Amino acid sequence: MFGRKDVYVPLVTTKRTGLVDQVIEQFRELMASGEWSLGSRIPPESELVTGLGVGRNTVREAIRALSHSGLLEVRQGDGTFVRATSEISGAVRKLCGSELRHVLEVRRALEVESARLAASARTEQDLRDLEVALHDRDEAVRRMDRETVITKDADFHLRLVQASHNPVLIGLYEGLSEAVRSSVASAFDPEIPPEEHVSHTELVAAVRDGDADRAAAEAGGFLDELLAQMPSTDD
């Protein structure tokens, strides 16, 4: 489940033409820029109405349209949350649904290609971010802290995809963020000793060395093992 993070952002008063479209566009920009980050709760309706200078129905219609696109989720009594940061990622999230095998298959396709691209596109900052993310993930595994492992492992894989510097891949992967966390949670086995859990050290080394084929193989290997353990959807 997404964490509850309240966010405050400045809003620009809309013009009096095409109000709903203008509000939708502002909301899209706030999500795409990260002002409204993935998983965050957007400001309450009353604040949006005041900040935008529009009526409640206009705000509600804009939220309804973005919910239909998969970008927002309205939780009755809890608020409205960012579920995706672009129409692309929203569509991917809706298409994949909750079927774990489907999620893993899409994860594999995106992460393998991201690793291949990252081996040549990564910057020194990307490497530092990957190494920090890997350290945090491995430390959580060492402590066998399930919830932290799930968060840090998902963060590591997102960092890898971001190192590809391909905005379409990144958008697609962000659309799977909640499903990726669920797949990590399903794969975590507390009965396995820390030293026997999947290691991503060689994956980072391959990206650091600029070895695209090795990076792709490392990225796909552990997902292939997980998929091999699962029954086919045709069974």
Image: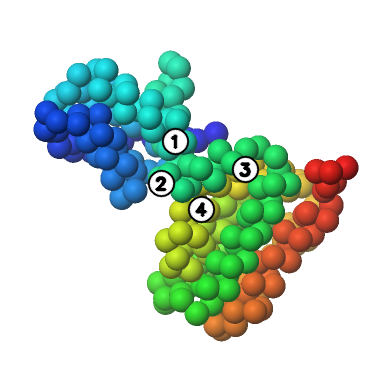
Labels 1 & 4 near each other (Cβ < 8 A): no
Residue under circle 2? Answer: 86
Q: Residues within 10 Å of mark 3 (few under 14, many from 20)?
A: some
* Camera-nearest residue between 141 and 211: 211
Residue 214 % position (x, y): 66, 78
Q: Amino acid at mark 2?
A: Ser
* Camera-nearest residue between 131 and 38: 38
Q: Amino acid at mark 1?
A: Ser
| Residue at mark 1 to residue at mark 4: CA–CA distance | 14 Å
Q: Amino acid at mark 3?
A: Cys
Residue under circle 4? Answer: 172
Q: Residue furthest front?
A: 18
Q: Amino acid at mark 4?
A: Leu
Element type at mark 3: helix
Residue under circle 3? Answer: 96
Q: Is residue 52 above or below residue 192?
A: above
Q: Residues within 10 Å of mark 1 (few under 14, many from 20)?
A: some
Q: Residues within 10 Å of mark 2 (few under 14, many from 20)?
A: many
Element type at mark 4: helix
Mark 1 and mark 2 lie on one chain; the one further toward the N terminus is 1
- Res 3 label: none
Mark 3 and mark 2 lie on one chain; the one further toward the N terminus is 2
Residue 117 % position (x, y): 53, 73
Q: Is residue 105 above or below residue 119?
A: above
| Residue at mark 3 to residue at mark 2: CA–CA distance | 16 Å
Mark 4 and mark 3 lie on one chain; the one further toward the N terminus is 3
| Residue at mark 4 to residue at mark 2: CA–CA distance | 9 Å
| Residue at mark 3 to residue at mark 1: CA–CA distance | 14 Å
Residue 129 % position (x, y): 46, 66
Element type at mark 2: loop
